[in-house]
Image (tube, rainbow, N blue to C red):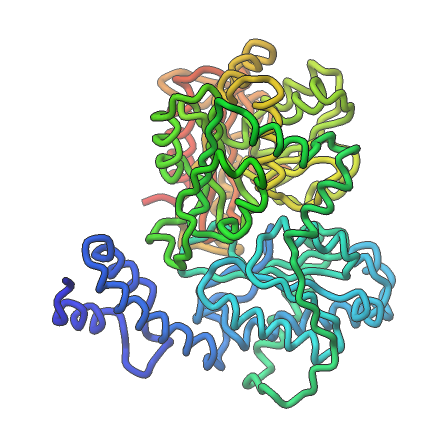
Amino acid sequence: MVPDEQIERLHTNFVVKNNHSRSDYFSLIRELLKNRESDPSAQSAIDQIYRLIEDEIVTNQGVPVNEINFGTSGWRGILGKDVFLKSVRCVTEAIVDLYRMADTESDLHQFLGVSSLEEARERGCLVGWDNRFGGEVLGQCVTDTLREHGFKVYFCGETTTGVLSAALLELQAAFSVNLTPSHNPLDYGGYKFNAADGGPAASELTAIITQKSRARINAQSEVEEGHTKLRGALVETDSFALWQRLVDKNKGTHRLDYRSLLDQVGAHRDMDIVIDSVHGASRLHIKRLLGPAAIKLEHLRGESDVTFGGIAPEPSSENMSRVTQRLRDSRKKLKIGAIIDPDADRIRFTDGDMEISMNQFGAMSYHYLHEYKNLTGMVAKTVATSNLANSVAVTLGEELFETKVGFKEFKPVIGQALVYFEESDGISVIGHTPEKDAYIGLLLALDMVVSTGKNLGEIKAEMDELYGEFYPDRDGVAVSLKGEPLLAALAKLKKYDVGTSVTIGGKKKIIKEIITKDGRKMIFEDDSWLMVRPSGTEPKVRFYVESRDSDGTAHLVDAARSMLAEVGLLD
């Protein structure tokens, strides 16, 4: 057992009595998690700390430590310190202000998908959250605020980002709010806002929400509760059933016959499926998602745990190791493994022998829909994603749409591109949502494997023969700089321009092309490349690399780190 005196010492180090602002609750939780596996009594101490965090979420009448900012995928911040009832209410009020502006500013209509505040009230909003601590109390705050302003609210409870997007489209609602920081660690909360098209809000909208949220949080002295009548209707909603309805309805467009596929997988005699939900919201849907195919399922980390065991719950190689090992031990012919992040907008695959990230899977999906499902059309990807998809598009004689990071950047080609995906394990397809969705990715993987009778690694090997080999990687470094100082440091990388020689792995490489759609992407004469950009969701600088041979990737990573050190962003 954890000795009482040890817990008391930890409290002294991290908690200032009756002072939330000076207490570091999540660092204390991380310390306690080190003992939880060997000592179940540690959970009791963790629960006590979460009660303090809940009190901070409810009572904090200050301003966020970090200014509210909607990045590439909503607003994220530390629970209690940045994300609390008052700040969440101010953001929600800012969204109401946004719809109020639609009454007089017609240029917003194309981005909102509605033409007035009254139309938005009538069409309503969906509200949900992932498994994060405080989700329900924050979700209730959003719901009450919207109802006070006369909005109909479709109350979805714990659910996923992709499911909310599908439900929004099926209900033809005005917008959705999902309280989630996606794959960020346990101390984060977040707020995702999707307008009527079901996709991440356009920059034209998030800039207004950011500005109005900051103005409100600085002007409002405290949150007043229970003083206003809840005028808007409240509708309890099964968002996942609506997701299923959308997939069924559009099978003629994306050629994924959901119900038939589940029957085929369920009847297959030589197949294993292992899914790791990492305690996230997908744990509530995965068996319903698979239906008759769930008899093949081994579900890992499918229980509730707001701490995620202390890990950053992203679809990383390290987090995938449990799935990989389970499938490596399997004797079945066909094996599909996947790890899904907390709000299920990201997914990564393995067959036990080979890991398939979205860099590969997005291109594989495009090839599959084009060549096996006989669909024609472009492929869309972010500039940080592997150029494997570029090679597929050129070979098939199709168009490529390449844009900066952020799923909202795909808006111009929704309904045209067969597949749109980004390197950070997000994907969607034609006829589905304009929001990334792990579930549609899983259906694609199942369809590929069942239709071809081959594992994903085998399919990838065949694609290497057809389109060439690509070896991508990515990483990120935490930085203390932000805003203009960070951009000023990164601007020093402009010295690496076309014609510049860079030493990589002991060899000189000449830059042949620079792409500045998002950060700085340097493409070398051998078609290898490296790219550096500031994160839109975390205090990090991210870098991405790709080599055309397996040995070159590590050298590119080293080169990227050297460049960041050179401009003062690494110690």
* Image quadrant where one finds the C terminus: top left
| Residue 96 in picture, x, y percent from top left | 72, 72
The residue drawn where x is 30% and y is 63% is 29
Q: In the rendered view, tell whether residue 407 sits above or below residue 107.
A: above
Pick the front one: 118 or 39: 39
Pick the front one: 536 or 523: 536
The residue drawn where x is 79% and y is 70% is 121
Residue 150 seen in render: yes
| Residue 257 in picture, x, y percent from top left | 70, 32
Q: In the rendered view, tell whether residue 288 sits above or below residue 176.
A: above
| Residue 524 in picture, x, y percent from top left | 53, 20
Residue 544 seen in render: no
The residue drawn where x is 47% and y is 68% is 134
| Residue 71 in picture, x, y percent from top left | 59, 54
In the picture provided, is 226 more to the left or to the right than 135? right
Q: In the rendered view, tell whether residue 479 sits above or below residue 492.
A: below
Question: Which image quarter: residue 440?
Answer: top right
In the picture provided, is 189 more to the left or to the right than 288? left
